[in-house]
Image (tube, grey):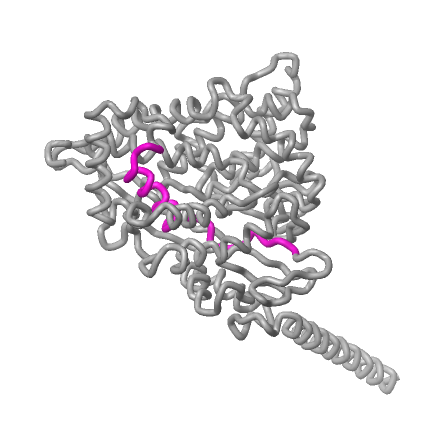
Amino acid sequence: MLESISDLELSNTAICGLAAASVVTWYIVTSLKAYYRLRHIPGPRLARFSYLWEFYTIITGRVQDGYLNLREYGPLVVTAPGTIVTDDPEVLRRTMAARGSYSRGMWYAAAKFTPDTDNLASQLDTTAHDILKAKTTGPYAGRETEGGLERAVDVQLLRLIDLIRRKYVSRGDELRSIDFAQLSRYFTMDVISGLVFGKAWGHRTRVEILISKYGLLGLVGPKPTDKSGLGVIMKYVNELIAQRFASKDKPTKDMMGGFIRNGMTRSECEGEAILAVLAGNDTTARFGPHSRLWGLSPVTIVRLTTPHAYARFKKEIKEAVQQGKVSSPITNEESQKLPYTQAVMWEGFRIGSAVTFGHYKVVPGGGDTIHGHYLPEGTLIGHNTIALTHNKKVFGEDADIFRPERFLECDADKKAEMLRALDIVFGGGRWTCSGKNVALLELNKVPFELMRWFDFQVVNVHKPVIEKAYVSKLHDDMFVRIAEADWAGV
């Protein structure tokens, strides 16, 4: 009997040992295979064999420096097995060409908020994505919105100005500091909720977002029955959509009305609405075509910490108002005619882009050759947005600093090259950001109007803002003092 037990224990030990040896062997073989496939592409040594470099860079919050430093390896860099990133805008344009054969990688699946319904950002099937995009293009372009996109932005912009004037303006030696990062999140939430549902939720809804892992959504993902976090927002959105479907005979002039008229199902509307609403908030991880990567807070902080740009921007505002070149609020068309306003806008977008890396596409069958390097079929190639927006070949040797003058001192061809590089951050072809028009409207109008009516001053001069860089950049504690604009010294 004892011998039988001893043999059984030995057998169990042998099985465990064999299993462990199999796992180790599998890991070594697959690592070597991954290395061999992309052995000709440079990158961090650890990234060539495992996901540890990428995991460590993200988990320690070193994405900003980590991905920026990848510039030293060249335009194509290995960051994980079978995965490369690029800071070459033309390569990215190629992977997103309207008639191209590249498809989305599994990275996009993380934007799926419910286990049974895809949205524009999470849909991996190209044909299904194109069908859904055809139903949403009109509403996102503002064709279903009462008065159009610009009017919707103007309504919320005027409310924001009124809110600041009533609650946050400091006078004399008074200090009413406000976290501008939070305030900008409220504003963008109001804009997108107003566009989607025809009525803004008001500067009161703070969304704390928890993105769950694909494949576990049915078990651990957010649910409308949750008492906190994303589930609360899902419940509210779903209730609003249920009301719409219960009264479909009463058409509305907003995005949701357009979705319904274009034949989207209730579950499709729920998936798209929750994505649109969450993508309108700076706390959201930026995925796919909805990413609100134009966050107002980073654009603002770089202006406030660059005195010469702040002063020159204020001067152009004063002259434009005095000469009658602008309405109140400024129109999108008027903004585009003001040289320094445009330079500040694009430089702020460039240096303060909230996206860091990602948006991986799959190299099609037969592979592809880029920059003289063969990329095997199935290789993932994505944005290194941090390095792209700091690309010295495109933006100059001083690309790491905020200097709007770069857009004014160059010739027309160079300016076009820089703007073309920044445009690809919005995606391209069928993958173009659906919220691009709203983004540009906000950037063209909001900074000008806020600086027109108010003066801003950083409160915490030693640490103006807390920035955390993961797949996207998150901003908090950007406290500012706001006063009524004083034009006497401008």
Any part of residue 474 in sight: no
Q: Nearer the viewer, residue 479 or 30?
A: 30
Q: Nearer the viewer, residue 403 or 298?
A: 403
Expressed as whole percent of the image width and height from the top left, the position of residue 144 reads: 55, 21
Residue at image coords 20%, 47% = 307
In the image, taking residue 349 as reference, residue 48 lies left or right, namely right
Figure check: 223 above or below 69 = above
**Number of numbered discs:** 0
Expressed as whole percent of the image width and height from the top left, the position of residue 58 reads: 49, 60
Furthest-top residue in this view: 250
Residue at image coords 65%, 32% = 134
Name the image quarter holding residue 486.
Answer: top left
Any part of residue 93 in sight: yes
Residue at image coords 21%, 41% = 312
10 in the magenta segment: no
Q: Quadrant of the N terminus?
A: bottom right
Expressed as whole percent of the image width and height from the top left, the position of residue 412 reads: 37, 45
Q: Nearer the viewer, residue 437 or 61?
A: 437
Figure check: 352 above or below 27 = above
In the image, taking residue 31 as reference, residue 410 lies left or right, namely left
Residue at image coords 38%, 24% = 154
Expressed as whole percent of the image width and height from the top left, the position of residue 30 reads: 69, 72
346 in the magenta segment: yes
Q: Nearer the viewer, residue 440 or 257?
A: 440
Magenta region: 336-362
In the image, taking residue 234 as reference, residue 400 lies left or right, namely left
Figure check: 68 above or below 175 = below
Figure check: 47 above or below 311 = below
Furthest-bottom residue in this view: 3
Q: Quadrant of the C terminus?
A: top left
